[in-house]
Structures are given as C-alpha cells and as structure tokens.
Amino acid sequence: MRILLIEDEKELAEALSAALGKHGIVTDHTAHLADAVELTRQNLYDAILLDRRLPDGEGLRFIPELRRTGETPIIVLTARNEPKERVEGLDLGADDYLGKPFLVEELMARLRAVLRRPPNLAELKITAGRMVIDPLHLSVTVDDAPLDLPRRELLVLAALAKRKEKTVLRATLEAAVYNYEEEIQSNALDAHISRLRRRLAEAGAEVSIHNIRGVGYLLREE
C-alpha cells in the first residue's frame, strides 16, 4: 500500500511514516499542498492523509484537486477536532476525520475501513496458486499456513499477485516498495525477487516469477 501524507509537523511526519512502514505502508510525505497536488499527478495513491493547517492553505479546500484523478480515500488528521469542524471536514469530502493526538492502531483501522469501500475492493485478499495475500493486514498464507516474509518482499509479491499473469513494470514494483525520497540501489528489486522465488518454492506456493527482460516481472500460477 502506498499513501501520501500531507503534514507540516516534521517530527510527527517522520514518526508516523516510520510507524506506518512497520505495517507495510510506503509513505510519500510533503508539507505543502502545491507539492501534494503535483505528487498526485505523478503517482497513484491508495489513500491520502491530510492535515488542515498547512503553510500554503487550508487542507480541506484542496480535497477536490487532490482527488481529481479518481476516488482516492482521504483521511483528515488534525488538531481541529471540535464537532463543528469534523462536520465541516466530512461535508467537504473527507472520507474520515481523526483528531490529534491519535493511536497508530486506530489510524490503521480507519485506513482498512476506507479501503474496504468501493472502488477499493481490489485491495482485499489476493489469491494466487496456493497462497492468499492480505495487503491490509500485511500477511501471506500458503494452504492456511503463515509464510513469514520481510516487509519489502511482501510488498513486491502483493504488487505482482494483484496483476498475476500480467507483466508489471520495474518502476511500478519499485513504487510499491519505496517512497519517492528513498535512493534505490540498481539491483535492489532483483535481489527481492531472487529471495522471493526461493521462499515461494520452499513453501510450495505453486506460483513462479518470470523476468521480462528490460521491462519488469510477471507472476504466473503453476
């Protein structure tokens, strides 16, 4: 899962990005609405976390522009949490409204809730071969037995399985694993794929990952 965090409190943004990362979420962060709009033009996000008081404006006023390419769920995270302010946020298009301070566990529950709504049903469990992937809870099972995978390998696997039998571009896979600020080593993706192949074969998942030279990778059911 990849989300956009629009938050001008640097320490909070860093802490929240790190906490979400433990749940397998790749977070792009910006403190400015203008940059956020540009990021939504360049990337597809599963959800947007939006503060209200930002250096270049009121976050709620940008909801239509942030969402212009689809129905991306937007959760407002703000200290402005009076009933009237919550009503205002929901009326202006937010899918959910969470007052600061909050627990990461509650935010995760709210993310799972908004992602279960149409048109995000594709984010529910993915089946391929003998395995089932749950992207929202960051888990994989093979014949109901848990398969323990490092977070980044699991993100690569979920991106491939969601598009099984189709070629997935390298850039798409990298975007599923790394945020735009991270430096990606040239062979990092290939290393993830190599380890995944071995783990899946050992688990008897009955899927295989094929290299489409110069383009990307494809997951096929055996």
Image (spheres, grey):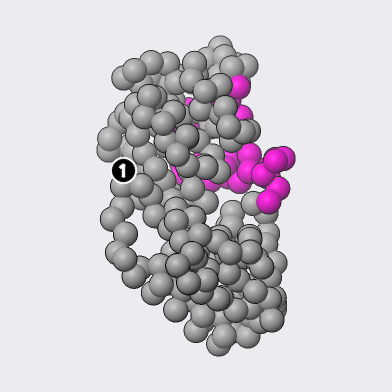
Q: Is residue 43 left or right of residue 113?
A: left
Is residue 118 shown above or below 155? above
Q: Which residue is painted at 56% across and 80% down in the image?
A: 200
Residue 22 in which image quadrant: bottom left
The quadrant of the image that shows the C terminus is bottom right
The part of the image, by quadrant, that contains residue 95 is top right
Q: Is residue 110 magenta?
A: yes
Q: Is residue 21 visible?
A: no
Residue 163 location, x and y as percent? Answer: 63, 61
The correct choice, above or below, for 114 with respect to 155 in the image is: above
- Residue 208 counted in the magenta span: no
What residue is disc 1 on?
Answer: 14
State the image coordinates of residue 5 (x, y, percent, origin top left).
42, 37
Residue at the (56%, 29%) spot, across then down: 67
Mark 1: few/some/many CA within 10 Å (<14, 14-19, 20+): some
Residue 47 pos. (x, y %): 54, 39
Residue stretch rendered in magenta on the structure: 93-122
**Is 196 or 117 nearer to us in this picture?**
196
Is 150 placed left or right of 74 in the picture? left
192 is higher (above) or lower (below) than 44? below
- Kind of residue at disc 1: Glu
